[in-house]
Image (cartoon, grey):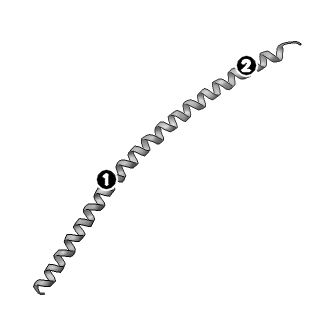
Amino acid sequence: MGEESFALIEKKISDLVQVVSALKKEKESLTAELARKDGEVRELNRKLAELSRERGEVKDRVDKILSRLDTIEL
């Protein structure tokens, strides 16, 4: 193999190392974004549960009011 062949192999390896490095950085970025999104999903699920609980409480109160109204004789 000549000097040109080694230079070509070195260039290809160097290019490959750069691609791998870029992919690692992209993976880290995507992993961080996924962690943020997971946190957002957990927070939204918590809010949804709270709103569902509040909705149930309001429904119960309205049902009690309506049942009291049913007992009124007109």
Q: Split into 4 quadrants, where in the image is the C terminus? A: top right
- How far across and how far down the image is residue 5, in percent? 15, 84
* SS of the residue under disc 1: helix
Circle 2 — which element? helix
* Residue under the point 68% across and 20% down: 61
Residue at the location (31% across, 53% down)?
Answer: 28
**Rendering coords of residue 10 (x, y %):** 16, 75
Residue farthest to the left?
3
Q: Is residue 10 left or right of residue 55?
A: left
Crowd band around label 1 with a 10 angstrom C-alpha radius: few (<14), some (14–19), many (20+): few
Establish if 70 lies above or below 27.
above
Q: Residue at x 78, y 19 (%)?
A: 67
Rendering quarter of residue 68:
top right
- Quadrant assignment, res 62: top right
Q: Position of residue 72 (x, y in %)?
A: 84, 13
Q: Position of residue 6 (x, y in %)?
A: 14, 80
Q: Say if 48 sits above or below 32 in the image.
A: above
Between marks 1 and 2, how big is the CA–CA gap? 54 Å
Label pair 1/2, CB-CB below 8 angstroms: no
- Give whichever of discs 1 and 2 has the lower sequence position: 1
Residue at 30% across / 61% down in the picture?
23
Is residue 68 toward the left or the right of residue 28 in the image?
A: right
Residue hosting label 1: 28
Please, which residue is most extreme toward the right here? Answer: 74
Residue denoted by label 2: 64
Q: Is 52 drawn above or below residue 11 in the view shown?
A: above
- Which amino acid lies under the numbered mark 2 shown in the image of this protein? Lys
User: Can you name the residue that lies furthest to the bottom here?
Assistant: 1
Q: Amino acid at mark 1?
A: Glu
